[in-house]
Image (cartoon, rainbow, N blue to C red):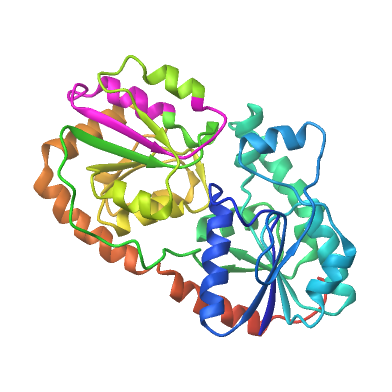
């Protein structure tokens, strides 16, 4: 098949959606498909480049989250879509609306992915706990973009249930974004102290602040080293929060190889997020044998990865998180045994299987709007 992926940014892998799109493109090409990417950024093979868009205030806020908007160039869009069998949309942004309209006019089947949880918006405007605000944004996203599609890709059953609850009538295809084969257990790197890791954007809904507070409350505070892999608008705030810890937290962005190397020296992985559609980062960590401790938030799909309650802590409760960290510090043999079970779980989410399932969806799609 000749496929077109529409995603506003494809170069900056600090964004989880971009990282997932890149994995899918790579694996689809390995399966013999031609995949064109309509995006902004640097030129490359089968990339059709849009200029960056500037939206007053919105672009400023989006930049802090590592999000880029593209400006639609109809000439480039037409060139990209000519001869394409299907268009796969990753994000509900203005450029995608223009591409969708042109694709329909060219009688090309379309699939939309759902990667922007309402809470990703509301937490960043101080309204994350408001049920009204979250329902408003789900309705807005539907009217603005998703009402145009008969079929939507959902990375988890959790987000499929959220869409059903918010009145989305489309066929919902639940397929994980998948974990790359390079994430698997390796020989540990010896290290001093006790290392705790979280991977993710430094933004309000991810709740890295809880991990800093939990480290402070832990019985082993003098031995805990915190590692945060990711960028985001709360970097300076979190640096200040962690300055008085016995070991000042590390904040860095890592290449894939660098991240895997770091994981080899990590003892415990924490995923503290209040809101999450899937959390590939958590899947990558437990696929490498790290036992996760996950917030039991009812707005996070990540909770369903927990094998048992030892891998869960009460949402927003730093004291409970500290107790769970202390438990795993005190039970290293138990942690090693459970880590092996998580590796098996990770093997059920491999990207190759996700791509195979997505190919079946592609084959089933027909032109036309609802």
Q: Nearer the viewer, residue 300 or 43?
A: 43
Q: Is residue 141 above or below residue 370?
A: above
Query: In the picture shown, does residue 66 fall above or below 18?
Result: above
- Viewed as shown, does residue 20 lie left or right of 35? left
Note whether residue 332 is visible. Answer: yes
* Res 295 visible: no
Residue visible at 20% across and 60% down? 340
- Whole-percent x, y for residue 27 in the image: 51, 74
> Furthest-top residue in view?
244
- Residue 19 percent coordinates (x, y): 53, 57
Residue 9 among magenta residues: no
Q: Position of residue 107 (x, y in %)?
A: 85, 80
- Residue at the (61%, 38%) spot, across then down: 65
Dividing the image into 4 quarters, which one contains the C terminus? bottom right
The number of callouts visible is 0
Please indicate whether residue 119 sits to the left or right of residue 70 in the image.
left
Q: Residue 60: x and y, percent?
A: 72, 33
Quadrant (top left, top right, bottom left, bottom right) of the N terminus: bottom right
> In the figure, 19 relative to 85: above or below?
above
Q: Residue at x 57, y 54 (%)?
A: 17
- Which span is picked out in magenta? 209-235
Where residue 86 sits, quadrant-wise, is: bottom right
Residue appearing at x 18%, y 48% in the figure: 189
Based on the picture, tell me whether residue 224 belongs to the magenta stretch: yes
Q: Is residue 161 above or below residue 363?
A: above
Frontmost residue, 302 versus 133:
302
Query: Is 216 on the left or on the right of 271, as rendered?
Result: left
């Amino acid at each position: 098949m000749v496929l077109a992926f529409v995603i506003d940014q494809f170069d900056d892998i600090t964004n989880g959606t971009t990282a997932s799109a890149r994995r899918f493109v790579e694996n689809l090409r390995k399966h013999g498909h031609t995949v064109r990417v309509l995006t902004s950024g640097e030129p490359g093979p089968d990339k059709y480049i849009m200029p960056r868009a500037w939206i007053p205030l919105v672009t400023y806020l989006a930049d802090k989250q590592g999000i880029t908007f593209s400006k639609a160039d109809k000439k480039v869009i037409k060139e990209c879509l000519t001869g394409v069998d299907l268009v796969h949309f990753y994000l509900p942004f203005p450029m995608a609306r223009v591409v969708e309209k042109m694709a329909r006019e060219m009688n090309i089947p379309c699939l939309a992915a759902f990667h922007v949880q309402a809470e990703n918006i509301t937490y960043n405007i101080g309204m994350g706990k408001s049920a009204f605000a979250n329902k408003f944004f789900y309705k807005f996203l539907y009217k603005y973009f998703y009402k145009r599609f008969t079929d939507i890709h959902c990375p988890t059953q959790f987000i499929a249930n959220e869409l059903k609850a918010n009145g989305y009538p489309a066929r919902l295809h639940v397929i994980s974004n998948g974990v790359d084969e390079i994430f698997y257990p390796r020989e540990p790197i010896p290290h001093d102290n006790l290392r705790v890791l979280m991977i993710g954007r430094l933004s309000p809904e991810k709740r890295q602040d809880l991990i800093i507070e939990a480290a402070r409350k832990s019985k082993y505070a003098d031995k805990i080293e915190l590692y945060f892999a990711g960028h985001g608008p709360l970097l300076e705030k979190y640096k200040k929060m962690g300055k008085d810890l016995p070991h000042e937290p590390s904040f860095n962005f890592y290449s894939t190889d660098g991240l895997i190397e770091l994981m080899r020296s990590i003892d415990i992985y924490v995923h503290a997020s209040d809101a999450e559609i899937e959390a590939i980062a958590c899947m990558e960590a437990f696929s490498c044998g790290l036992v996760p401790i996950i917030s039991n938030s009812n707005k996070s799909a990540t909770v369903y990865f927990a094998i048992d309650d030892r891998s869960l802590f009460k949402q927003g409760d730093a004291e409970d998180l500290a107790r769970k960290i202390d438990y795993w510090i005190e039970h290293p043999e138990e942690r090693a045994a459970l880590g092996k079970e998580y590796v098996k779980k990770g093997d059920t989410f491999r990207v190759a299987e996700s791509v195979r399932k997505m190919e079946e969806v592609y084959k089933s799609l027909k032109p036309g709007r609802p």
